[in-house]
Image (spheres, coloured by chain):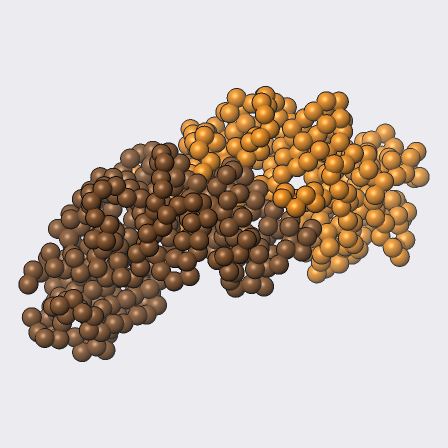
Chain colours: A orange, B brown
Amino acid sequence: MTTAGYYAAVDWGTSSFRLWIIGEDGAVLAERRSAEGMTTAAKTGFHTILDGHLAAVSAPAHLPIIICGMAGARQGWKEAGYIETPAALAEIAGRATAIPDVDRDIRILPGLAQRDRRHPDVMRGEETQLLGAAAHLGAGSHLVCMPGTHSKWVRLADDRVEGFSTFMTGELFDTIARHTILSHAVAEADTFAAGSAAFTDAVSRTRENPALATNLLFSVRAGQLLHGTAAADARAQLSGTLIGLEIAGALAGSGSVDGVCLVGSGGLGTLYRTALESQGLNVRAVDADEAVRAGLSAAARAIWPL
Amino acid sequence: MTTAGYYAAVDWGTSSFRLWIIGEDGAVLAERRSAEGMTTAAKTGFHTILDGHLAAVSAPAHLPIIICGMAGARQGWKEAGYIETPAALAEIAGRATAIPDVDRDIRILPGLAQRDRRHPDVMRGEETQLLGAAAHLGAGSHLVCMPGTHSKWVRLADDRVEGFSTFMTGELFDTIARHTILSHAVAEADTFAAGSAAFTDAVSRTRENPALATNLLFSVRAGQLLHGTAAADARAQLSGTLIGLEIAGALAGSGSVDGVCLVGSGGLGTLYRTALESQGLNVRAVDADEAVRAGLSAAARAIWPL
């Protein structure tokens, strides 16, 4: 082990790449971020991209690398498989897949799969955030919300994943805003205030009556035509309707829930916190970037103990 | 009035144009169909397109023309305004807008608007189908389903529109199938059987638990990854989830409903009939093409009595 680092941790998603060089004491010694996600890497080459970033931070030749995310998908660098739920988070490190025929020790963490024929579901990357977040949560049962393109809601009990559900919220928001008649209503606003009444009102209305979701979406357009709804409010309504539907679904059949652990960051984290609190839920926030780094580190220390 | 026709009836939608020459006895003397909807006509010119079709069927120079649909939208030929709900269907003909400065008598029928700030909604074209369908329905209260890009559900009482709700079902289906991660799951199938268990099962599951709609959408992808769901079944699940959500929403708060008037045609009509009957609803079907022609004819005869 050189003084220049203990291991490198990589979060390699569909459209983003992040790398941290971590020291023996857990300190972040260097960081790299780029848009070279799986989509780009599948063309450019995963090894080439990784080597470029390691060279840029003068990483030692034999620094081991731990990776999570879509690099482990079938269409990624090497398929890293899935651990089946219910699953202990501790299994994640033990089931890492090594990249063969390379000079370094490079391992990709597996995803989680729920094979239940009525509720099939998969995650890849979020399991590592969970592993990192779990250290903050302690024993007992937790409902964890991980917002994103495909939001994940996880039922965690004593560091075991009991089950989870994915909601297509983020992808639907982008697709509807770009490709449907609502694009006319939202086009002139890039963003909206998380605290706007248009947002929290849409969250509440959809949570109360989720069956009306696709009607409430059309009413965004009708409201613009008939009442001149401002673009920022229209965007807030679209977002609030989809997030309200997600919250209604995630809490359906969960019995009484008073608190949610929110693993998010940036504007999206703020938006979900606002939405959850508007529904009377206590939110315990864990930063998503820190969680994924903590999860990668927990796995690295299990695989390569000091 | 020439023997060659009493009036021409035109259904001018966003992406389609249909014209019928109708005789004094109500017979269809000639018919034209094309893809020159509002989108095309806004570039080519509405008058040019209409004249071309009239010339193709040798229509008399002064044949009057009745038009419904998006030709009356703000971005259409001439804005034909909206009648506000609650509204008697008989008002439709009385509020037609004439095209100025043309040799013929050309009128565009208005749409319907529901200005309620909590449930703003609009329709343009379907009001004319309703006018035509109402002749089949008789007095009393009816719940009318008009499937399409933007499905309309209308509460009709004694030829008055009490209120209506639009669901973005058709547009969401197309957009999700083309532009989201589900495109991988459905790409290899253009269609599916309306009677497939995958379709009716998805309708039932979403109607039972509409809050899970965007989770059930993701499970289409997860089912393909984990269980190799066939593309036709994946497409049926996507369609069934969106139609099940629509039915759940349309019936929410309607009290007990045992019958629905379905104004549809072709494959989409069959699909909705299957979905509605799978939910134990009695379906009374009215052909959508006949309904719009009947509605245009009812308006024409009110405007230009024999």
Residue A32 visible in rendering: no
Q: Is residue A93 above or below residue B106?
A: above
Total count of labels: 0
Q: In the image, residue A160 lies at what x, y percent?
A: 75, 31
Please state if B1 lies on the left or on the right of A179 as rendered. left
**Image-based side of A30 in relation to A236, left or right:** right
Q: Is residue B201 visible?
A: yes
In terms of image quadrants, where is residue B14?
Answer: bottom left
Query: Residue A26's image quarter?
Result: top right
- Residue at image position (53%, 43%) is B205
Q: Residue at x 12, y 59 (%)?
A: B301
Does residue A41 sit above or below A108 in this rendering? below
Q: Left or right: B253 with respect to B112?
A: right
- Residue B214 image point, x, y percent: 54, 43
Residue at the spot 16% in from the left edge and 57% down from the top edge: B298
Quadrant occupied by the N terminus of chain A? top right
Where, quadrant-wise, is the C terminus of chain A in this rendering?
top right
Q: Position of residue B113 (x, y in %)?
A: 26, 43
The residue at 45%/30% (across/down) is: A208
| Left or right: where A284 falls relative to B105 | right
Closer to us: B176 or B203:
B203
| Residue A261 at x, y percent in the picture | 64, 27
